Image: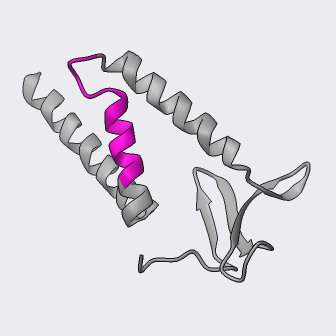
Amino acid sequence: MSRRFNAGEYFNVSGIEFRVEQGRKHPDDRVLLWWSQEYGWKPIEMTVGFLLADFFFENEEVLYPKPAKGGDYYLDACEVAARNGWRQADEQLKAAKVRAAERRRNVA
């Protein structure tokens, strides 16, 4: 794996502020935090990721039931994020949205 989150990195995604800090488990451990007006910088528990995966997978399954790809589309994007970085997965999603909009325009 050549990419690595570094302590001190900062991200703003969808208006939510995130930062990376040094973890306590190991010298290479990292912790992802998000900003809350009420609590300040708060570490994000893995449970949050599980909730997001559950929600997005289920929603895609409802919107695009079999034989469409449905939730598997989301899982594929998660694998891209895990192996190549979240920005690449985001770029692929944006490109797919552009292609879908073009298809809708061509049908109309």
Q: Position of residue 8 (x, y in %)?
A: 69, 80
Against 88, is 24 above or below? below
Which residue ends up furthest to the left in the rendered image? 106
Asked whether, in this view, residue 83 is left or right of residue 56, the answer is left
Residue 34: x %, y % from top left: 74, 57
Instruction: Give residue 92's position: percent from left, percent from top.
Output: 30, 53
Which residue lies at the image location 73% right of the left edge and 50% below the top edge?
45
Residue drawn at (39%, 26%) of the image: 60
**Residue 16 highlighted magenta (yes or no):** no
- Quarter of the image for the N terminus: give it: bottom left
- The quadrant in which residue 55 appears is top right
Q: Which span of residues is magenta-colored?
A: 66-79
- 22 sits left or right of 69 in the view: right
> Which is more toward the observer, 13 or 8?
8
Q: Residue at x 11, y 21 (%)?
A: 108
**Magenta stretch secondary structure, dominant:** helix
